[in-house]
Amino acid sequence: ALGISGAMSSVMTATTIAAAGLTALVAESARAAGEIETLAKMDGTSAQEFQRLSFGARTVSVDAENLSSIFKDVGDKIGDFLETGGGEMADFFANIAPKIGVTAESFRNLSGAQGLQLYYDSLQKANLSSAQMTFYMESIADDATRLIPLLKDGGAGFAEYARQAERLGSVLSDLELSQLKQLSDDARAAESALSAFGSRIATGVQPAISALVSSFDGTQLTETARDIGDGLSSIIDNFDTLSAT
């Protein structure tokens, strides 16, 4: 009885664990999908483009959330200058932009990612020293300096990693992102259904297990077990005798 009960318990536990594991995997994928869409909207770019950019950014230790924050800062500071003519981009437009023929209007209607690329391209054309480059990059966004290897030469690094992301199938379409979010809801429902299924199996076999337990005669079982033990002992003794000869 204990063996049957234990087996049923194991089945229920395995079912629950499998359901929980599936839900956890899907939930994490759905969370990532939702995060991609949210962070992309903050930058004003498509979810696919943001995935390509974040794939490259990870190679310089900038995660998706930090990358989005950098792009948002760039967009905010460009917008601030366009509205007020001041802010942290004032030095750039006073000292750098006139030398290379870039105007504030060149930055209008750009996403944060596009604005940062144009900003860096302008600094690169101005032939700044390493210290000056760091000053201007950090003034537009914290940690923006980390992205320099990807921004060089018109964003060649970002472009190469974007191609790699596409080759590896790392860029999810809008449909796939939507399906992941829907799958998260479905997985939670499946977990609940599987848990209930396991419970119903247990309640279904409970009467049979109870009847089996009730039919057991303890004295008879003890005698049967003793007889089996004596029989095995006799077999072992005979085997030892045969081996000795």
Image (cartoon, rainbow, N blue to C red):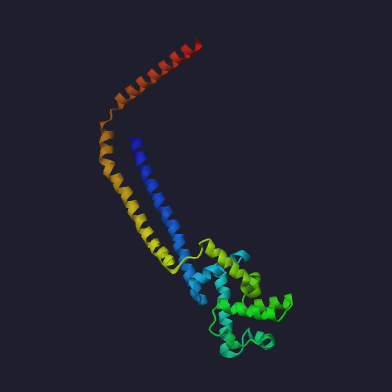
> How many callouts does the rendering have?
0
> Residue 191 location in percent, x, y?
37, 55
- Relative to 17, is 129 on the left or the right? right
> Residue 197 location in percent, x, y?
31, 50
> Residue 86 location in percent, x, y?
61, 88
Image quarter of residue 140: bottom right
Image quarter of residue 112: bottom right
> Residue 242 location in percent, x, y?
46, 12
Above or below, comparing residue 119 to residue 160 in the picture: below
Which of 244/58 is in front?
A: 58
- Relative to 77, is 240 on the left or the right? left
Which of 198/179 is in front?
A: 179
> Residue placed at 34% from the left, 39% from the top?
5
Q: Quadrant of the N terminus?
A: top left
Instruction: Residue 139: tell me if it is visible.
Output: no
Above or below, comparing residue 70 to residue 17 in the picture: below
